[in-house]
Amino acid sequence: MPIPYPISDVKIWGRTGPGRSWLGSLAASSLVVLAPIGTIVLYIGFDVIILRYDPRPTAEAAFAIACWVGWQAVLFQVLPAEVCEGQYTPAGHALTYRLNGLSAWIITHLVWVTLCWAGILDPAFIARNWSGLVATMNLGGVLVAALAFAKAYIYPTHPRDRKFSGSSVYDFYMGIELNPRLGQNFDFKLFSNGHLGMMIWTLIDFSNMAYQYQTAGHVTLSLALLSALQTLYVLDFFVNESWYLGTIDIAHDHYGFYLAWGCICFLPTMYTIQAQYLGLYPTRPSNTYLAAVFGLGLAGYAMFRSVNNQRHKARLLGRNCRIWGKPAEFIVASYTTADGKRRESLLLCSGWWGWSRHANYVGDLVFSFSSCALVGSPQIVVWTYAFWMTMLLVHRCMRDEKRLEVKYGDAWAEYCKRVPWRFLPGVW
Ligand code: NDP
């Protein structure tokens, strides 16, 4: 809409002046949507909603979650593992990680199938006990975040890799310790992100398939394709677990409510919304529609994997790396760790990383929107996952770039000049 008077850069008292960041506009627009809904929730009564839908922990759900966490902790500790080194931390540590997520995933799912086959476990147990499980995971996530917060003060793993913002609330939210561990190997982040969060995703999908089968007498193609697509994504995560060590989750984000509650409660509840919906309300989009959307989802996944592989390969092989048949091009970026040592990173400028600075996010978004589209419903709740991923990845891109600007200085500026687009060339 045209502005009815000229905007000048000069600030006038009583006005904040022109130039709102798009993030500020996004926050404002969230309020525009949430405030009216909030008044309706107030009118109905929050307690009435809670009582009506009954999301409270049950003994059964608490027992199931305790078994789940205990079982995963045992697998994490005892299964043979590939030992890989992570990136240098700001304090100059290069930690080793025991990676056995793939074998843990296979064993977990084989045990699940066997228990269901033997009639010991209802394959639809998760779907049938969902409200109790959500409530228990919610409390569990908050509890783990609180433990991580206390541990950071009382018993930190690497004291010089802690981050204090000056606000305890913010520290609780974003985390203090970078790599909290119990003993040498029990890494909180790797365990809760992979073994608790990603691992349960496929079981939730399968449980909703079982629920649909038990209640509707069949499994719809849309739910089968959705589960296949998401299983591919989860398996990819575990097959490429060493790549995960170089991502922001492990290499840069500190462990607080954001990661602990996020992986223990938010990931299982939010990322599986489409399967939950289809378990309750089967849909029947046409086969042509499903084939097209499934194909798009596979294409998104292929792009996501190819971009991530290029970076991983470039960091492993350095100057010997070839991308798309040509020697890879790099910008040499140096940075200093807290021990005073000057270190070097290579910023890849070839292949996808010369196309845009976060092409992996684009692939992930194509994948996310396709999985929501597989449901074949215009209901907003079905699309929540894709909207969430858009917000998460756009925000992630902004905060990562801010950090890289400080870490690499001129080298980062040079990369941004050479590859000016964040997501889609010509768009943003
Ligand atoms: P990246 O894997 O893109 O890692 C970003 C880091 O890569 C930067 O911090 C920097 O680290 C390094 N880097 C940046 N530019 C270059 C370059 N040109 N060459 C070499 N290294 C570079 O981001 P994420 O960790 O956020 O995401 C990893 C994947 O996981 C993505 O595909 C994303 O879509 C997905 N993801 C999925 C989520 C989900 O919930 N499903 C959540 C988050 C991510 P350094 O300091 O080492 O230089």
Image (cartoon, rainbow, N blue to C red):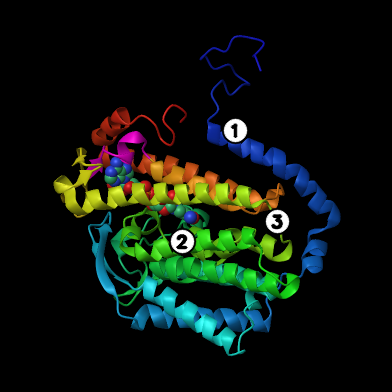
- Residue 82's spot in the image, x, y percent? 27, 72
Residue sticking out furthest to the front: 288
Which residue was labeled with disc 1?
25
Magenta region, residue range: 346-357
Q: Residues within 10 Å of mark 1 (few under 14, many from 20)?
A: few
Which residue was labeled with disc 2?
232
Q: CA distance from mark 3 to mark 2?
A: 22 Å
Dot 2 falls on a residue whose secondary structure is: helix
Three-letter residue code for mark 1: Ser
Left or right, 139 with reference to 9: right
Q: Residues within 10 Å of mark 3 (few under 14, many from 20)?
A: some
Query: In the image, is residue 352 part of the stretch drawn in magenta?
Result: yes
Left or right, 340 with reference to 142: left
- Residue 216's spot in the image, x, y percent? 74, 70
Which residue was labeled with disc 3?
284
- Residue 365's spot in the image, x, y percent? 50, 46
Q: Residues within 10 Å of mark 2 (few under 14, many from 20)?
A: some
Q: CA distance from mark 2 to mark 1?
A: 36 Å
